[in-house]
Amino acid sequence: MALEYNSQDSSLDGEVHFLELEDPYVKRTLCFPSEVCRDYSERLERLLSDGFIYLLETGTRVMGSRYLGKGYSSIVVAARHSKLGLGALKILRSDSRRKSLQGEAEILTLIQGLGVSPRLYSHGDFYIFLEILPPGVCSPLHRVLEALVVRGDFELTRSILINTLKKLHGLDCIRVDHGELNRPGGHLYYCEGGRVVILDWESARTVSRPVNLTSFVSYLVFRFKYRDVLGRVLNWRLDRVLTALKTYKSAYSSTEYGSVLNALGLE
């Protein structure tokens, strides 16, 4: 008989699948998107030896099963660890062109002090175990901003934008580029308590000219649904914004960062 897990956040309720060799969900997850794979037993043994107890089938339905998320290189499932508790287990897909998730784990280790990503608990060649962000606690940032603009709460809008740009500036300063923030929809999240979190670091890398802040600002002034309303309230002038961004990319200093905030009417 299947066990059910009921959390304080009902969005994480689901079916428990202990890490057993013949469990169909476990096999489907560790071999995703295939039903079987040649390194299934090896992966299962590694997770068990590293302290994992079960997978929790919850989230969005993907190919007949429920998961927290799916990317080009990985599948994300809720999992219970004997010491670390419940978290998000990111597993390398069996059809991925990547050989491991070590590069992403190294980036996540590098940025932990910035508080801009989920907390990294542990990792191996084919998996990364992270803090889980329940849907009831965190929402896509652009949706939060849209709701605030419609409501006319520009004070909180300004506060969230400043906090977001501060995080992105921090990333730029250590020369880590996320690589996907020109499309922030599935990557930038706003959580209860004012926390801004970036997900999906598969494409992240260290570079000499990161574009985290400039990508997000470009989205904000050119593609955000209510950019015209926000621009009028904050008194944007596109020529000033673009000049400030160009200067910012030359040094990433606090002075240039302040000029971007000023051009956006946030300072």
Image (cartoon, grey):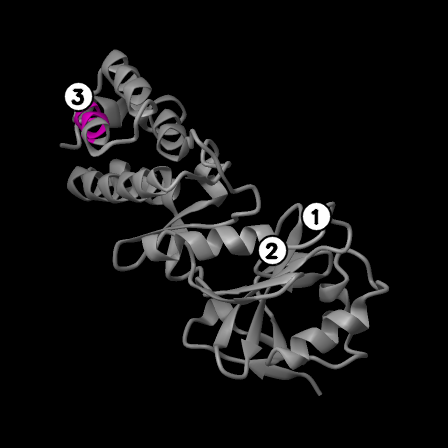
| Segment tinted magenta in the rendering | 258-264
Task: Give the position of the N terminus as an image quadrant.
Answer: bottom right
Residue at left offset 33%, top offset 45%: 144
Q: Which residue is mark 2?
A: 102
Q: Quadrant of residue 57?
A: bottom right
Residue 255 in picture, x, y percent from top left? 18, 29
Q: In 3D space, how far apart are the residues under numbered discs 3 and 2 (Cα atoms)?
A: 44 Å
Structural crowding at the residue carrying mark 2, measured as other residues with C-alpha within 10 Å and reported as few (<14), some (14–19) or many (≥20) = some
Q: Which mark is residue 235?
A: 3
Identity of the amino acid at label 2? Gln
Name the dominant secondary structure of the magenta segment.
helix
In the image, residue 221 above or below residue 5: above
Q: Nearer the viewer, residue 43 or 78?
A: 43
Q: Note whether residue 225 is visible.
A: no
Q: Residue at x 40, y 35 (%)?
A: 212
Q: Distance of mark 3 from mark 1, alpha carbons?
A: 45 Å
Residue type indicated by callout 3: Asn
**For mark 1, what is the residue?**
98
